[in-house]
Amino acid sequence: MKKLIQFFKDSAAELKKVIWPTRDEVSTSTVVVLVSVVIFAALLGFVDFLLANVIELLF
């Protein structure tokens, strides 16, 4: 039981050392991720469309 209590004390001490991002940093990062996902999804969709048409022409 002592080890479990010590684990939680150590965990709390480590969490106090963490530099948490600000709300602005989180929202900016979220926007960057969402825009990146949309761009890559569009790119992959376009490549899929092209490959499907090429395969259709071949067969």
Image (cartoon, helix red, strand yellow):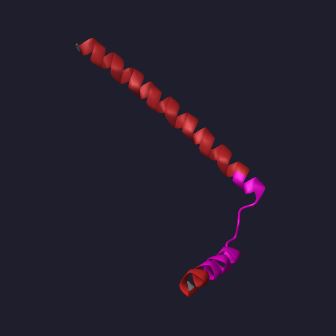
Image coords of residue 45 (percent x, y): 46, 27
Image coords of residue 5 (percent x, y): 61, 82
The quarter of the rendered structure image containing the C terminus is: top left
Would residue 1 appear left or right of 54 to someone viewing this image?
right
In this rendering, the answer to whether 49 lies above or below 10 is: above
Q: In terms of image quadrants, where is residue 13?
A: bottom right
In the picture as drawn, the residue positioned furthest to the left comes out as 59
In this rendering, the answer to whether 45 lies above or below 31 is: above
In the picture as drawn, the residue positioned furthest to the bottom comes out as 2
In this rendering, the answer to whether 36 lies above or below 54 is: below
In this rendering, the answer to whether 24 lies above or below 8 is: above
Would residue 4 appear left or right of 23 to someone viewing this image?
left
Task: Assign the magenta stretch its main secondary structure.
Answer: helix
Q: In terms of image quadrants, where is residue 44?
A: top left
Image point 48% across, 31% down: which residue?
43
Image point 57% across, 34% down: which residue?
38
In the picture as drawn, the residue positioned furthest to the right comes out as 23
Numbered range of the magenta stretch: 8-26
Image coords of residue 53 (percent x, y): 35, 16
Magenta includes 23? yes
Magenta includes 59? no
Would residue 43 appear left or right of 7 to someone viewing this image?
left
Image point 39% across, 26% down: which residue?
48
Q: In terms of image quadrants, where is residue 19?
A: bottom right
